[in-house]
Image (cartoon, helix red, strand yellow):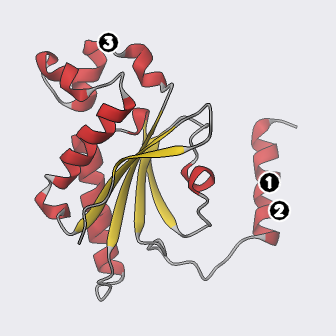
């Protein structure tokens, strides 16, 4: 059996045992997690979320880039179009991790300046090799976005050696 066949078999088991057609498009915890593509950092597993509780945006490094902000704004409009009467508190969690592969290419300005849309001289401020500094920078970028100012934003770092998350930036007090 090849990988695709195995995944399809797993999907059939899921559809028969755990599929819930009542789930809504908007996550029930009104939370979007921005995280890395690294398979060690599955936010539903790491944070104990159930199906339908969180939305997830994944990219290299779990970073907030101009493209990430654009995606969040599009998702915000989709949510408004889907359920315009929802006014509950919304959250964004930036979840980065230790031993991230993006740190292995932190000297590749040719790739990273384009990814982060920054000039080469500004690349050190992006903190590619330091997940705690990167989380602080990315949370600040989200909090500075006027279209997201009604959303609680916080930042965590997941330790791939212990399985624990550490709060780097707590949500602001209401």
Query: Which residue is pictured at 32% across the width and 76% down the height?
Result: 89
Q: Secondary structure at mark 3?
A: loop
The answer to whether residue 26 is above or below residue 141 is below
Query: Which residue is pictured at 56% across the width and 41% down the height?
Result: 41
Please give left or right for residue 157 compared with residue 44 in the image.
Answer: left
Question: Residue 153 placed where, x, y %?
Answer: 29, 58
Please give left or right for residue 72 compared with residue 1 in the image.
Answer: left
Classify residue 114 by image quadrant: top left
Between marks 2 and 1, how big is the CA–CA gap? 5 Å
Residue 13: which disc?
2
Please state, as top left, top right, bottom left or bottom right, where the N terminus lies in the image.
top right
| Circle 1 Cα neighbour tier, 10 Å, few/some/many (<14 / 14–19 / ≥20) | few
Q: Residue furthest right?
A: 1
Residue hosting label 1: 10
The answer to whether residue 71 is above or below residue 159 is below
User: Total number of numbered labels?
Assistant: 3
Q: Mark 2–mark 1 contact, CB under 8 Å?
A: yes
Query: Which residue is pictured at 31% across the width and 34% down the height?
Result: 134
Please state, as top left, top right, bottom left or bottom right, where the C terminus lies in the image.
bottom left
Question: Residue 70 placed where, x, y %?
Answer: 24, 51
Q: Secondary structure at mark 2?
A: helix
Residue 108: which disc?
3
Between marks 3 and 2, how big is the CA–CA gap? 43 Å
Between marks 1 and 3, how big is the CA–CA gap? 38 Å
């Amino acid at each position: 059996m090849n990988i695709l066949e195995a995944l399809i078999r797993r999907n059939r088991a899921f559809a028969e045992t755990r599929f819930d057609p009542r789930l809504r498009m908007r996550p029930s915890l009104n939370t979007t997690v921005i995280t890395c593509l690294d398979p060690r950092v599955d936010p539903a597993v790491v944070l104990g979320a159930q199906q339908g509780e969180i939305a997830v945006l994944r990219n290299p490094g779990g970073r907030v880039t101009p493209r990430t902000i654009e995606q969040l704004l599009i998702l915000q409009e989709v949510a408004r179009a889907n359920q315009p009467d929802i006014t509950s508190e919304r959250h964004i969690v930036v979840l980065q991790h230790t031993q991230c592969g993006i740190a292995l290419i932190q000297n590749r300005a040719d790739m990273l300046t384009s990814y982060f849309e920054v000039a080469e001289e500004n690349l050190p401020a992006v903190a590619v090799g330091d997940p705690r500094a990167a989380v602080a920078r990315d949370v600040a970028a989200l909090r500075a976005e006027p279209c997201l100012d009604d959303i609680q934003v916080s930042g965590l770092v997941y330790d791939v050696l212990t399985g624990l998350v550490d709060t780097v930036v707590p949500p602001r007090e209401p």
